[in-house]
Image (tube, rainbow, N blue to C red):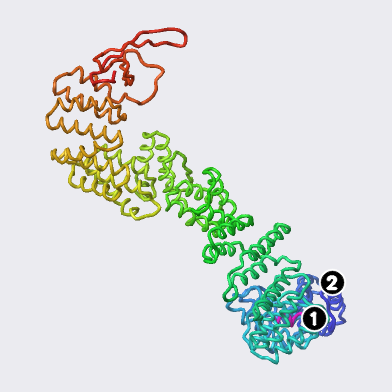
């Protein structure tokens, strides 16, 4: 009991036997003293520590043992007051409080009084806390406990290994040295690559060449006994290089490079040997030998070989045939090892495309041929970018529009899913928008938004905005609306507008005016034009001021942008002029119309602006200047422009008071079958002449006709309602003064009815 107690029930039985069978109280007291002494000596046995108190509780009411229970209770109270027992009871816990208690126990005189089992348990708890649970800033305080652990159990190799690890991770150089010297006392029990790495790093931190050589010799002895581990060889070689032991370092690198199957660490060893080697040919030989070995490293080795070929010898050029042949073979090898990482970096190869394009030794045909070989590599991102470069090369024969657009689309799902491929394709989309190739820009933009999942929202927003701007330039119905976009309701309004539902489009705008104001710079141009036109038509100072601010802000932001087309810029400048015109600020309007003519001379908006200049003069009653403008426009080669100029000459004559000339001009305009809008304006002005002449029935007929021309084809018509018809057939003799034309209307069932087309009074052709 005093020398070999246990934690089992046998110990309980012995204590119980001694306490119950002592001949007298003196013998009982001696037994209690002996048990409590053993208890203090073997505190690691929890059952031994707790059983005396349990015996007291079990026998305090036993009439035969009550007195002895009281004696034991008094002795136990005195024993439990011992400082060692108090601290031992509080030693647990992976926290700072437990660590503080254990640090007291590990100091003299308590630690010296402990048996080996207690010491091992206590040191295991303390070192485990500092290794795994202590705050990082406090872990360096734990190295001394690992040193104490190793000193106490100096022949335990596992403890020595943990000592090395803790010293390297958190200790100072002196602590690393002590841990290493302790480890070197052992004979290697097995191959442990991580231990070897840590031992050399500890030697390196002390910059001790002799210690490093001793360590390296220890590692070599380990490898002779237990074999070479193909990990951390490059790291160990790097440490030896830092210590200026190049021969030993090279030996480490050669060990890794010479393995039959090349590992990732072996690949790094090859790279170190290549860096040491000065001869270009030998560099290539080292890499090619490693490339030929079975491994998952051939992709990165291919990149290393290619990098050397891309830096040719002096007075030589890059041999692109060698480079591409190497890449082609590497791609074939990759296909034989699917779903395995080989270290091949497609994004680096994308950079080679720029080198090809900038290689002055290549002519156009050679450059195109090389890019086509890159396309045929079928490598992620590389082939897609090469294809896009060819599609954007004006010197390359391009496929038809649909196959071309399909190639642009294909590039968006052959460029990976991360930001690198996303950024590559975004540059092409931006370039397409800048070159007014907005269909291409939208194909690329919507494709990368759909096919790239691992990109941040800022990148997606930039492309989403680019797509929105490009759609405004296309003017097509099709529009991809991202539901997550903050401007989705306004894009929906643009979609309604393109589908022809202007009322619903304006309603959507009206419900989201504040959103429109917040994102006005991102709005499609056709939507902005529609809203501005509506507001100008509604009139009022509030609308005129809002339109001025909206349009001027747009012009300031986009007038110099390459991503906005000339037509859009001219349209917005023209809308600004029309706003001033409707607000009757004619001098400013004329100035803005002139800006359109001067800045965008070859656009349809320039023609509209010239008409605006003439109308501004007319509203200011400067009739001679207005006449000059309209006369100039009437000499244009386009029929519609001439007819419009003639119409305004008629308005000008009416304003001057020459009704006869105005009537003749208006009738002449109607004979030329102008567009619907101009015809309606002509009819209205002709009706105004009839009003002045008090020909009210003719005026009424014309006013009824306005708005009915050219809107839609009709199979049915309500009886009693007028039906406006323009007759173009000169054989009917309308020009000879006939004012009524008989028409036989037939149905598919054989019914017939005779109706008459009656002249409207607007001149020839309108009934």
Residue 223, label in figure:
1
Q: Earlier in the sequence, mark 2 or mark 1?
A: 2
Q: CA distance from mark 2 to mark 1?
A: 49 Å
- Image side of residue 449 versus residue 95, left or right: left
For the residue pair 224 and 319, the one nearer the viewer reads as: 319
Label 2 neighbour load within 10 Å: few <14, some 14-19, many 20+: few
For the residue pair 5 and 557, the one nearer the viewer reads as: 557
- Determine whether 651 is above or below 230 in the image: above
Q: Position of residue 717 (x, y in %)?
A: 37, 16
Q: Position of residue 625 (x, y in %)?
A: 15, 41
- Image side of residue 671 versus residue 127, left or right: left
Query: Quarter-wise, where is residue 282 in the image?
Result: bottom right
Q: Which region is colored magenta?
A: 158-164
Residue that label 2 marks: 9
Magenta segment includes 583 = no
What is the chief secondary structure element of the magenta stretch?
A: helix
User: The residue tagged with tag 1: helix, strand or loop?
Assistant: helix
Q: Position of residue 383 (x, y in %)?
A: 60, 56
- Please report the residue visible at 26 percent of the width from the left and 16 percent of the height from the top: 759
User: The residue tagged with tag 2: helix, strand or loop?
Assistant: helix
Query: Quarter-wise, where is residue 154 in the image?
Result: bottom right
For the residue pair 296 and 349, the one nearer the viewer reads as: 349
- Image side of residue 527 versus residue 281, left or right: left
The image quadrant where one finds the N terminus is bottom right
The image quadrant where one finds the C terminus is top left
Q: Residue furthest bottom?
A: 210
Magenta segment includes 161 = yes
């Amino acid at each position: 009991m005093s020398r070999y107690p246990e934690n089992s029930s046998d110990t309980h039985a012995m204590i119980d036997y001694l306490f119950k069978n002592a001949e007298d109280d003196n013998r009982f007291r001696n037994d209690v003293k002996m048990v409590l002494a053993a208890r203090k000596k073997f505190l690691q046995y929890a059952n031994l520590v707790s059983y005396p108190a349990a015996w007291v509780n079990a026998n305090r009411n036993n009439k035969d043992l009550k007195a002895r229970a009281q004696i034991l209770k008094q002795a136990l109270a005195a024993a439990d007051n011992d400082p060692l027992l108090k601290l031992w009871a509080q030693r647990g816990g992976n926290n700072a409080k437990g660590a503080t208690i254990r640090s007291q126990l590990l100091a003299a005189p308590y630690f010296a009084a402990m048996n080996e089992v207690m010491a091992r348990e206590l040191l295991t708890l303390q070192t485990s806390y500092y290794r795994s649970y202590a705050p990082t800033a406090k872990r360096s305080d734990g190295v001394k406990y690992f040193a104490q652990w190793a000193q106490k159990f100096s022949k335990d190799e596992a403890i020595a290994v943990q000592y090395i690890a803790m010293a390297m991770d958190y200790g100072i150089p002196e602590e690393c040295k002590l841990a290493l010297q302790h480890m070197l006392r052992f004979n290697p029990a097995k191959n442990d690559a991580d231990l070897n790495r840590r031992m050399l790093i500890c030697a390196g931190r002390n910059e001790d060449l002799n210690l490093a050589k001793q360590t390296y010799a220890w590692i070599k002895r380990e490898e002779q006994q237990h074999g070479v581990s193909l990990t951390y060889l490059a790291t160990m070689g790097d440490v030896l290089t830092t210590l200026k032991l190049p021969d030993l370092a090279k030996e480490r690198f050669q060990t890794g490079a010479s393995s039959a199957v090349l590992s990732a660490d072996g690949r790094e060893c090859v790279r170190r040997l290549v860096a040491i080697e000065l001869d270009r040919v030998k560099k290539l030989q080292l890499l090619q030998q490693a490339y030929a070995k079975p491994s998952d490293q051939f992709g990165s080795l291919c990149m290393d070989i290619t990098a050397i070929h891309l830096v040719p010898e002096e007075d030589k050029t890059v041999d692109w045939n060698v480079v591409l042949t190497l890449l082609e073979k590497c791609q074939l090898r990759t296909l034989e090892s699917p779903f395995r990482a080989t270290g091949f970096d497609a994004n680096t190869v994308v950079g080679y495309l720029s080198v090809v394009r900038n290689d002055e030794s290549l002519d156009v045909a050679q450059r195109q041929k090389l890019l086509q070989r890159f396309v045929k590599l079928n490598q992620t991102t590389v082939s897609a970018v090469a294809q896009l470069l060819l599609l954007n090369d004006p010197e390359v024969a391009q496929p038809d529009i649909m196959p071309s657009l399909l190639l642009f689309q294909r590039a968006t799902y052959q460029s990976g899913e991360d930001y690198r491929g996303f950024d590559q394709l975004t540059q092409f989309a931006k370039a397409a928008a800048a070159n007014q190739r907005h269909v291409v820009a939208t194909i690329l933009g919507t494709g990368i938004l759909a096919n790239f999942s691992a990109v941040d929202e800022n990148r997606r927003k930039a492309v989403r905005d680019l797509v929105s701007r490009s759609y405004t330039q296309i003017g097509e119905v099709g529009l991809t609306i991202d539901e997550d976009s903050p401007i989705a309701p306004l894009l929906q309004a643009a979609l309604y507008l393109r589908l022809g539902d202007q009322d619903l489009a304006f309603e959507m705008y009206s419900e989201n005016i504040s959103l429109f104001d917040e994102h006005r710079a991102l709005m499609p141009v056709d939507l902005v034009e529609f809203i501005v036109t509506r507001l100008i038509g509604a009139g009022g100072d509030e609308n005129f001021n809002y339109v001025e601010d909206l349009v001027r802000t747009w012009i300031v932001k986009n007038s110099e942008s390459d991503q906005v087309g000339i037509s859009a810029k001219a349209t917005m400048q023209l809308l600004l002029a029309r706003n001033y015109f409707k607000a009757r600020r004619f001098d400013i309007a004329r100035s803005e119309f002139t800006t359109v003519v001067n800045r965008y001379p070859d656009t349809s908006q320039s023609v509209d602006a010239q008409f605006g200049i003439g109308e501004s003069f007319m509203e200011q009653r400067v009739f001679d200047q207005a006449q000059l403008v309209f006369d100039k426009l009437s000499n244009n080669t386009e029929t519609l422009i001439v007819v419009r100029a003639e119409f305004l000459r008629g308005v000008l004559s009416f304003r001057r008071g020459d009704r006869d000339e105005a009537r003749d001009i208006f009738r002449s305009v109607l004979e030329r079958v102008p567009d619907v809008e101009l015809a309606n304006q002509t009819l209205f002005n002709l009706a105004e002449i009839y009003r002045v002449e008090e020909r009210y029935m003719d005026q009424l007929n014309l006013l009824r006709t306005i708005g009915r021309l050219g809107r839609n084809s009709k199979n049915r018509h309500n009886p009693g309602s007028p039906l406006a018809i323009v007759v173009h057939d000169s054989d009917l003799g309308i020009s000879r003064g006939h004012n009524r034309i008989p028409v036989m209307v037939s149905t598919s069932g054989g019914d017939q009815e005779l109706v008459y087309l009656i002249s409207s009074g607007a001149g020839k052709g309108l009934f």
